[in-house]
Image: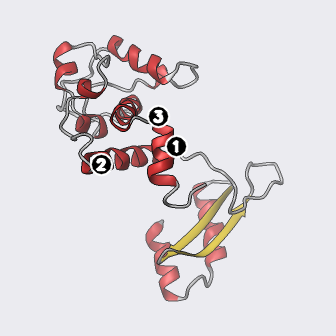
Amino acid sequence: MILPLLMVLAQQPLNGFDAYAQRAMKDWRVPGMAVVVVKDDSVVFAKGFGVRELGKPDAVTVHTRFGNMSTTKAFTAMLVAMLADSGKLSLDDNVYIHVSDFQLSDPYVTRELTVRDLLTHRAGLGNADYLWYGQRNSTSEILRRVRLIDPAYPVRAGFIYQNIMYAAAGAVIEAASGKSWAEAIQSRIFRPLGMR
């Protein structure tokens, strides 16, 4: 999807882009989207397409807020890397060094699990989204309950996409930065980028 967009912009900047965006929304079955193109620190194009919700007339604008879902994993990994670069942590630190009450069902894995393991989905846990999806559990309660989950495979022996371990990475960020995950993301990533 991105490559055709870049090809369209490179050939004749924005010529036919509206039709391309409309076709993309149809192909991906989305009611609306906002597109912003930044070149050399300047916004060169910004436009909303479609509607916010099917069956409702509210149009998408460049100021429409969308859930960013798992892109928060990229922000989390970026902030961990920034903290590692500044010497506040190492990717190979054991998680318990930063989050002393973090515990998995296997004491060996609890001792051996690294920050890198959290970010690479290789902690050995199966999908544990039932701990948060449709629940009102706080992040600390979710992380407390991780100790009750049986491993799906030995640590570092496989890959299972894991939302809960990114919550644990957020706890590492909080410990290493002295700020909540949200404030650390705001101050280190969003504000410097002008994302209000």
Circle nearer the N terminus (3, 2): 2
Q: Which labelled disc corresponds to residue 180?
A: 3
Q: Position of residue 138 (x, y in %)?
A: 52, 21
Residue type at mark 3 is Ser
Q: Quadrant of residue 103?
A: top left
Category of crowding for the residue at label 3, using alpha-carbon neighbours closer than 10 angstroms: few (below 14), some (14–19), many (at least 20): some
| Secondary element type, mark 2 | helix
In the depicted view, which residue is nearer to us: 57 or 72? Answer: 72
**Distance between the alpha carbons at the discs numbered 1 and 3:** 19 Å
| Extreme-front residue of the structure | 178
Q: Which quadrant of the structure image shows residue 46?
A: bottom right
Looking at the image, is 189 positioned above or below residue 145? below
Residue to which mark 2 is pinned: 81
Q: Is residue 70 visible?
A: no
Residue 68 vs residue 105: left or right? right
Question: Which numbered disc, 3 or 2, marks the residue closer to the eye?
Answer: 3
Residue 120: image x %, image y %?
27, 40
Residue at 63% across, 49% down: 66
